[in-house]
Image (tube, grey):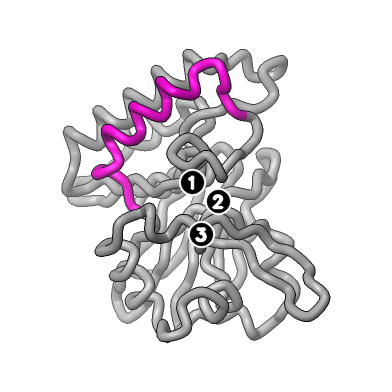
Amino acid sequence: MIIIPDIHGHQFWKEAVAKRREGEIVIFLGDYLDPHNFSETNITHDRAFDNFMDIIEYKRANSDTCVLLLGNHELSYVFVEFLAFPHDFRHHFRNRRFIIDNIHLFQLAYYTKQNGNEYLFTHAGVHPKWIKQNFKNFETPFEFYSYTLNIPLKRLKRKLNRMTSDGPFLKKRGSCVWLYIKDWFDFGSNLEFGNCFQIFGHTYLREAQPIITKQFAALDTRRAYRLNEYTGEISML
């Protein structure tokens, strides 16, 4: 499997998909628009949008082998409550219409089981505390995945619009599009969600090495990766 973390207008994904092997799945982890640090990257909002359209065309041409996940930046255009920064305010309604018109091509999660190993892909990771606080009957990653595939996105809006917060009695965990990497080091062994290995992006690691543990892989380094389905090894493309 080829894994493509947060795009934000970058085109590294094109070189990655060119290396795709026959039958190999390509998984985009979300956040296609809203480039960061224009002075460093020279990626404008318009260039990012053109790049996003190329990704949509790739998905349409490879619908059986390409998975597009939603990130918080896509939801920032779909729902007014989801305001992520940076945000293309000038072209907000253009971006909103384009995403809504193509929303059927996206999903919140992707689950697969390969050689006895379970993998769950989301934009920011699924924290078990968020599951317990919002989906009390879910015990397995597959139940969560199946649920997100079969329910309208707007019915999940309130659950998804959750960022980590410290309350006087309860610490709430961010959702699968808002969780940050620091949230994965607070509860030690309590991070397990079933026996599933999680793969996500969202927290930009500034082109450093990815963070890979026994429970998860955080890959937002502006590089693509390959998951070996037989060994479970994740390597840079």
Range of magenta residues: 87-107
Q: Residue at x 30, y 72 (%)?
A: 114
What amino acid type should be assigned to the residue bearing mark 1? Gly
In primary-sequence order, the first of circles 1 and 2 is 1
Q: Estimate the spatial distance between the alpha carbons at disc 1 and disc 2, rounded to whole Å.
A: 9 Å
Q: Nearer the viewer, mark 1 or mark 2?
A: 1
Tell me, for residue 158, which label it has, or none. Answer: 3
> Secondary structure of the magenta portion, mostly?
helix
Left or right, 22 with reference to 86? left
How crowded is the residue under tag 3: few (<14 C-alpha within 10 Å), some, or many (20+)?
Answer: few
Tags 2 and 3 in contact by the CB under 8 Å rule? Answer: no
- Cβ–Cβ below 8 Å for labels 1 and 2? yes
Secondary structure of residue under mark 1:
loop
**Res 224 seen here:** no
Reply above or below: 207 against 171: above
- Given the image, on which type of amino acid does mark 3 rest? Arg
Whether residue 95 appears in magenta in the rendering, the answer is yes
Identify which residue, 116 or 68, lies in the foreground.
68
Q: Is residue 133 above or below residue 46?
A: below
Q: Which mark is residue 201?
A: 2
- Distance of label 2 from label 3 (alpha carbons): 21 Å
Q: Nearer the viewer, mark 2 or mark 3?
A: 3
The residue beneath circle 1 is 71
Which of the 4 quarters of the picture holds residue 162?
bottom right
Name the residue type under label 2: Gly
